[in-house]
Amino acid sequence: MVAFKGIWTKSFWRAVSGEYAASLIFVLLSLGSTINWAAGEDNPPPADLVLISLCFGLSIATMVQCFGHISGGHINPAVTAAMVITRKLSLAKGVFYVVAQCLGAITGAGILYAVTPADVRGSLGVTMVNSKISLGHALLVELFITFELVFTIFATCDPRRTDLSGSASLAIGFAVAIGHFFAIPYTGASMNPARSFGPAMVTLNFDNHWVYWLGPVLGGILAAALYEYLYCPDPEVKQKLKQVFTKELTGKYKVVESDETIIKPGSIHNIDLAEKVEKNDPFQESSGEVLSSV
């Protein structure tokens, strides 16, 4: 219950409602690009993969630009999970974000279902595994394309970088589009459990639906962990850990017993990663939590 003590604030619910609205708009507009209006013709043309990929990519870029300063603009449970495991987002907010994202996706898919004629509605953009590949291969595809997306998010929204001058939201949109260019023929290119959950709930089509949760969440967590703890570790946290642990000649680590230790033994889990952005960081909320701009 301690993790949920901060939910009764206006900023908290503003952020949660922002995730709902962003997910609703994203799913509505993006799934709309999958509708084949020539489906009733004798020889309907195949789906335009370029159109669909660009619509998904540009839609997510636009939503990130619009809602990034309100909620962080996750719009994706895999991104939220990645933020939680790297302690950039509280567990409480992460849970509410995922619920809001799924409800927004259901609402967006429901609106599209209501305004689209039944004879062209088709599968309503439900993500499906290609019958020519196994479920294991589909899981790997979803894992890798979500890894590419989340790694892009962490790299472009890293406040420690001084070499970036372009648009983070546009880079993230390109990452989504690239994933769709590659993976639509394989799995429909979900990259986002909420995006798959919305139309699946509206059409009650949950075939192999677990792939679109497990693959993206694993890919997102793996990307976040590698970026934060291997490729670009926080030097301040690393220095603090050095002051707590020392390596013996045997290769084992032991706790430094000293009154001058900055972080006392037993309080390692309380290291606050938000400390590094307290000074004019645009990604910091008034509550002190650091959010991604995605």
Image (cartoon, rainbow, N blue to C red):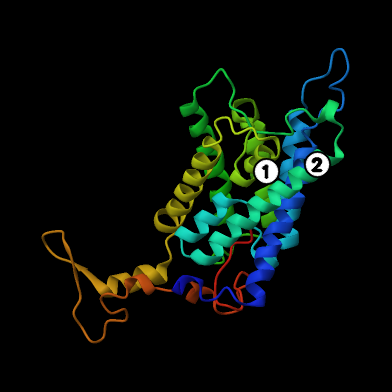
Q: Which residue is mark 2?
A: 112
Marks 1/2: CA–CA distance: 11 Å
- Of the 4 image quadrants, the one containing the C terminus is bottom right
Residue located 51% across and 48% down the image: 220
Vertical side of 207 occupied by 56: above or below: below
Residue 107 appears at what percent x and percent y? 74, 49
Q: Farthest top residue?
A: 42
Q: Check residue 198 in the rendering and tell me which mark sits there, or answer none.
A: 1
SS at circle 1: helix
Name the residue furthest bottom: 259
Q: Earlier in the sequence, mark 1 or mark 2?
A: 2
Q: Is residue 142 left or right of residue 180?
A: left
Q: Residues within 10 Å of mark 1 (few under 14, many from 20)?
A: many
Residue 249: image quadrant is bottom left
Circle count: 2
At mark 2, the secondary structure is helix
Three-letter amino acid code at the position of disc 2: Leu
Q: Residue 188, image x and y in percent?
A: 64, 31
Residue 271 % position (x, y): 39, 73
Q: What amino acid type is highlighted by mark number 1?
A: Gly
Disc 2 packing (10 Å; few <14; some 14–19; many ≥20) = many
Seen at 71% across and 44% down, the residue is 57
**Residue at point 48%, 53% (across, down):** 224
